[in-house]
Image (cartoon, grey):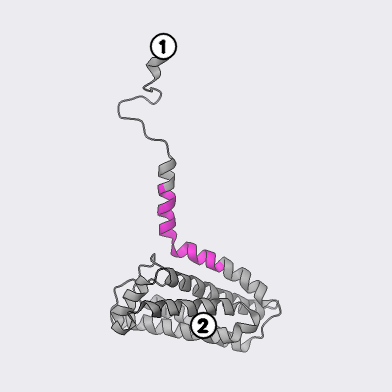
Amino acid sequence: MAPDEWALTAADAAAAAVLLNSGLAKLVVPGPLRRALAELTPAADRPAAVRGLAAVEIAAAVALIVGPLRVPAAVLASLLGLLFAAFGVLGRTRRSTAPCGCFGASADRPLGWSNVAVGLLLAAVLPLAATTATPADHTEGAVLLASTGSLALCLSAHRELIRQRLLSRIRAAAPPAPAAGRPLDASPLAGSEAR
């Protein structure tokens, strides 16, 4: 693949990774985004709307990495990006405090500048798609890059939860500390061996 083809494949894969993680998180845990949107406008307080948005995000993510569907998916990804940016601006201007839940319950930031930035980056997928021809091996490269990106994004978005779970397992597997005043090699059965 030529450098511009790699750039297109990487951009599509990155957008797909963001949309897939975001969509799956909203599908599984729609509550945080519902509360954040309700804080901005009570009309948006509908679980079906959040799950519908999640389904559209997942569909756009999958279509972005399939060569023949790439351009229509880029249009959809760009529209989603503009919607995210608009929600970010609205959240910032209305001083939103509810966590957006964009990447699940682990997200603790309200709608704001980060949504604007991600939205504008997603919106940039369309101009790139419109100016670059689809490489023959786009799907294979995009699937590999999107999978890797999704894993990295998921680990990053949930790093605190992962850290807490790992620490609790390490603590559970550690041997108990000796009781105060008892030497390490003394056991309650030590005297029974001499009998």
List x then y, in percent, for residue 116. Answer: 41, 80
Q: Residues within 10 Å of mark 2 (few under 14, many from 20)?
A: many
Q: Secondary structure at mark 2?
A: helix
Q: Secondary structure at mark 1?
A: loop
- Amino acid at dot 1: Ala
List x then y, in percent, for residue 18. Answer: 50, 73
Quadrant containing the C terminus is top left
Q: Is residue 74 left or right of residue 42?
A: right
List x then y, in percent, for residue 78. Answer: 50, 85
The residue at the point 54 percent across, 77 percent down is 61
Residue matched to label 2: 77
- Amino acid at dot 2: Ala
Q: CA distance from mark 2 to mark 1?
A: 77 Å
Q: Residue 4 occupies which quadrant of the picture? A: bottom right
Which residues make up the magenta segment? Answer: 149-168
Name the one closer to the observer, 124 or 168: 168
Give me the disc on residue 194. 1
Which tag is nearer the camera, tag 2 or tag 1? 1
Q: Residues within 10 Å of mark 1 (few under 14, many from 20)?
A: few
